Amino acid sequence: MSDWNALSDEEFRAEVRRFVEAEYPAHLRNPPHRLHWREGEEWFRILQRKGWVAPGWPVELGGMGLDASKQIILIEEYERHGVARLPDHGVIMLGPLLIRFGTAEQRARFLPKILAGEHIWCQGYSEPGAGSDLAALRTEAVREGDHYIVNGQKIWTTLATDANWIFCLVRTDKSAKKQDGISFLLIDMATPGVTVRPIINLGLHDEFCEVFFDNVRVPAENLVGEVNKGWSMAKALLGFERIFLGSPRQSAYALSRLKSLAERMGVFDEPEFQDRYIRLRCDLADHKALYESFVAILRRGESLGPDVSMLKLHQSDLFQRITELMLEIGGENAGLLQPMEGNRDLHPAGLFIEARPTTIYGGSSEIQRGILAKNVLELPG
């Protein structure tokens, strides 16, 4: 179809639901951890054949051309069905940035390879001393003729072992105010001097990595936008990411698993459990209403304000509280690294571990509170 936006929201939702129920691989529903590229490539190829790899990109560049409202519906239906998130930094982050800030040559070079699954991208933002305070990053890129020489380290780089390219925020002017001396650089991970080391998390998975740069030579043509203006470009991507991270999906799924676990453990009808469970249900209902209020802003074509930080803050806290109760009632099952026998969807320890970093990634809860205090409540610094 050339114009998905011509469908009503109800018609589009029905189309998405038919598609995922008919085509999504059953063995990939609600995976217990973030999928590597090789694990999720089967679904990527299905999306590729459908032409649905890049929902938000313009049609003329290979995307679906969906407006914000339709993109939200797509996300909601994927979440409802338990569709796994693929290594999608190229589609969700780099693609829109190149479309908005890149040159025609950069778009022609990189966008088709993202759609083809030839370039798998990761995001080089956080550093050991610059996580929540990202503007304090120290990875340096020094211009030398037609190249930048990059030295430094990135950390918590999601699925860097799967990626063959990385987009990085690098410091190109040490003397400028820290937000003003940052540039946006695209780096081929096969370049000599790039080293990737996986970080094994509490669930014994290797989703996160360290990436080291030792005199890495990067062509100057791989700079996106103006030199020293990378910070403003990176901020332009954050609104939709905060909607995504604030989705009720994780908490809604965890609450359904909590109910199943309580029934299996024989505690669901106990008054004490019921009191805590109902409180969590009410909190989830509140969060869904909050989420819908921000979705409505996008559907009207308006920009999100700093108050969107409430979404991520509330969602991560709720997800953690639900999984903490799962651990309390799980008994001996709470220590298992694998799902409970007889039900692959019941994995108390796995969900508990998955909830731990949510208050850190995508901007820590402390940072979100600071944004709200300064920009919404107008409290003094």
Image: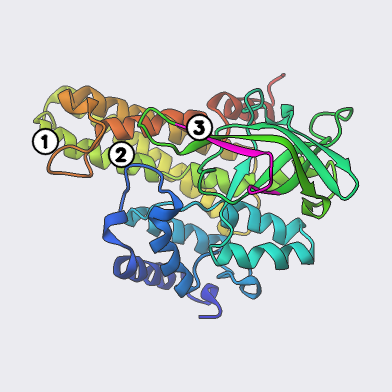
Residue 313 circle label? 3
Q: Are marks 3 and 1 in contact (CB under 8 Å)?
A: no
Of residues 153 and 180, which is closer to you in this image? 153
**C-alpha distance separating marks 2 and 1:** 15 Å
What residue would you read off at disc 1? Answer: 264
Of residues 98 and 327, which is closer to you in this image? 98
**C-alpha distance separating marks 2 and 3:** 17 Å
Q: On the rendered image, what quadrant is the C terminus found in?
A: top right
Q: Tell me, yes or no, whether the highlighted magenta stretch contains residue 322.
A: no
Q: Position of residue 93 (x, y in %)?
A: 62, 52
Count of labels shown?
3
Picture quadrant of residue 204: top left
Kind of residue at badge 3:
Leu
Q: Which residues are magenta?
A: 187-199
Q: Secondary structure at mark 3?
A: helix
| Mark found first going from the N terminus, 2 or 3 | 2
**C-alpha distance separating marks 3 and 1:** 31 Å
> Residue at the location (45% across, 74% down)?
50
Q: Secondary structure at mark 1?
A: helix
Q: Main secondary structure of the magenta part?
A: strand
| Mark found first going from the N terminus, 2 or 1 | 2
What residue would you read off at disc 2? Answer: 254
Q: Are marks 2 and 1 in contact (CB under 8 Å)?
A: no
Q: Looking at the image, can residue 319 be seen?
A: no
Q: Would residue 211 be found to the left or right of residue 8 on screen?
A: right
Of residues 163 and 376, which is closer to you in this image? 163
> Residue at the location (84% across, 47% down)?
147
Kind of residue at badge 1:
Arg
Picture quadrant of residue 247: top left
